[in-house]
Image (cartoon, rainbow, N blue to C red):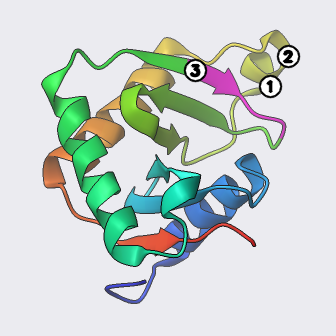
Amino acid sequence: MCKKNLSETEEKTINHFRYYFNNKKSFALIGEYVVVELADENSGDIEKLEQEALENISQVLDYPPDFCTYVMDDMFGLISMNFGIYGVTSEPLSDEEIETGKMNIAAALAVRSLCLEACENGKIITIVEQDR
């Protein structure tokens, strides 16, 4: 399901998350660098997937936005928030971040901000189905 032509950045983000989820999870792209992970049991039912994504977006805005950071093996940083909200850095991490395995707090907060902005916007750009 896609509501518009995807930008190069959106396509890149989809490819990041297909890789991160090993093509085993469905997700909704809600921002250029932000997705919502979706439950396996809703796979194949676009309406349920869309409803779940919108509920998760709403939920994350109702709770303190805790997050965890990860340095991924493709050299990008990943932010994981409550309710299956994830964001990826727009650029590869620095050599120091990769070497230490820790994201710079400024980069982490910037991605967290992108996640919150995407949730506040509340729009689903596309839903990507898991491989079956």
Residue 117: x and y in percent read 22, 43
Question: Label 3: how many residues lie within 10 Å, few (<14), some (14-19) or many (20+)?
Answer: many
Quarter of the picture containing the N terminus is bottom left
The amino acid sitting under disc 1 is Asp
**What is the crowding at mark 1: few (fewer than 14 residues within 10 Å), some, or many (at least 20)?**
few
- Side of 51 where 18 appears, left or right: right
> Which of pointers 3 and 1 indicates the residue nearer the eye?
3
Image coords of residue 86 (percent x, y): 48, 40
Disc assigned to residue 48: none
Q: Amino acid at mark 2?
A: Glu
Give the Cα separation between the discs numbered 2 and 3. 15 Å
Q: Secondary structure at mark 3?
A: strand
Q: Is residue 101 magenta?
A: no
Cα distance in 3D space between marks 3 and 1: 16 Å
Residue ID at (27%, 61%): 51
Depth check: give the residue in front, 93 or 53.
53
Estimate the spatial distance between the alpha carbons at disc 1 and disc 2, rounded to whole Å.
6 Å
Disc 1: which residue? 95
Residues in magenta, as a range: 69-73
Task: Name the mark on residue 99.
Answer: 2
Image height of 103 relative to 24, above or below: above
The dot on residue 69 is: 3
Instruction: Tell me if residue 70 is in the magenta stretch.
Output: yes
Q: Quadrant of the C terminus?
A: bottom right
Name which of mark 3 and mark 1 comes first in the sequence. Answer: 3
Mark 1 and mark 2 in contact? Answer it, CB < 8 Å: yes
Q: Please tell me which residue is depicted at 74% across the width and 71% down the height of the picture.
A: 131
What percent of the width, then of the height, locates residue 6?
45, 82
The vertical placement of 83 against 39, above or below, is above
